[in-house]
Amino acid sequence: MPNVIKTRTIPEYIREAYLTQKRRREYPRSYFLYIDEQGNRKFPVRDPKTGAYHCGLIRAALTRAGQYKYAQVEQKARELYQRYCAKKKEFVAKEVKGEMVLGVVLAPGEKDADGDVFTKEEIEKACWDYNTNFFNVAYRHGVMLTKEEAELLESYIAPADMEINGEKVPAGTWLQRWRVKDEGLRKKIADGEIVGFSIGGWIEGG
């Protein structure tokens, strides 16, 4: 069953608050994106202390809804994510009539959508781990893309301060270049519906 999973961006007090259905029923129905026929409350998206939307929860709901085929929940979570959490940093280079996009994954000292700030060392470690063990990419954090749809060409750490298309890129920034083969995805990039990269990672259990 979809549940709150342990991540860097979901504090322990939130996990504890939503750990069981008994605890979830202590909070308003509006804190959840889905309530089934038995009254079970699923996909929490609000901070239990403040009632404000929480980007870590929204991101988890978006991913889990896609995995468990809750199409309407996924759409709601996507709308919330775009409104409250979407990363605004755009691709630093793209060929609108071609297939290539180059963008910043993480930059040192800058807040991401969840308010986290990463050091050069953390970004370097994440980049190398990704390059060694993953190479995957998902659309909207939920739909995994195949190599026939998008292919990773470069994933690296900027070794020095640089400038790309007039945008300053500090040393230690994680950059990626993708060849986007899917025509539908290329259109979304050209139309500005897809504007950049956003990281996502989860640790289950524990």
Image: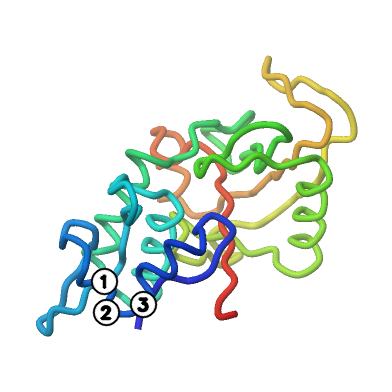
| Distance in Å between CA atoms under marks 3 and 1 | 13 Å
Label 3: state its secondary structure: loop
Q: How far apart are labels 3 and 2 at the CA level?
A: 12 Å
Q: Is residue 119 above or below residue 6?
A: above
Residue 24 drawn at (x, y percent): 26, 71
The residue under label 3 is which amino acid type? Answer: Pro
Where disc 2 sits, the SS reads: helix
The nearer-to-camera label among 3 and 1 is 1
Inter-mark Cα distance, 2 to 1: 5 Å
What amino acid is found at the position of numbered circle 2 in the picture?
Gln
Q: For label 2, count other residues whose C-alpha is less than 10 Å away and answer few (under 14), some (14-19) or many (20+).
A: few
Residue 196's quadrant in the figure? top right
Q: Please state if 45 lies on the left or on the right of 194 as rendered.
A: left
Query: Mark 3 vs mark 2: which is more N-terminal?
Result: 3
The residue that disc 3 covers is 2
Q: Residue at x 40, y 58 (%)?
A: 57
- The residue labelled by disc 1 is 24
Callout 1: 10 Å neighbours few (<14), some, many (20+)? many
Q: Position of residue 46 (x, y in %)?
A: 31, 53
Where is residue 158 shown, x and y percent of the image? 83, 36
Look at 81% across and 66% down and name the residue there.
132
- The number of numbered discs placed on residues in the rendered structure image is 3
The residue closer to the viewer here, 72 or 177, is: 72
Q: Tag on residue 21? A: 2
- The residue type indicated by label 1 comes to Arg
Secondary element at image label 1:
helix
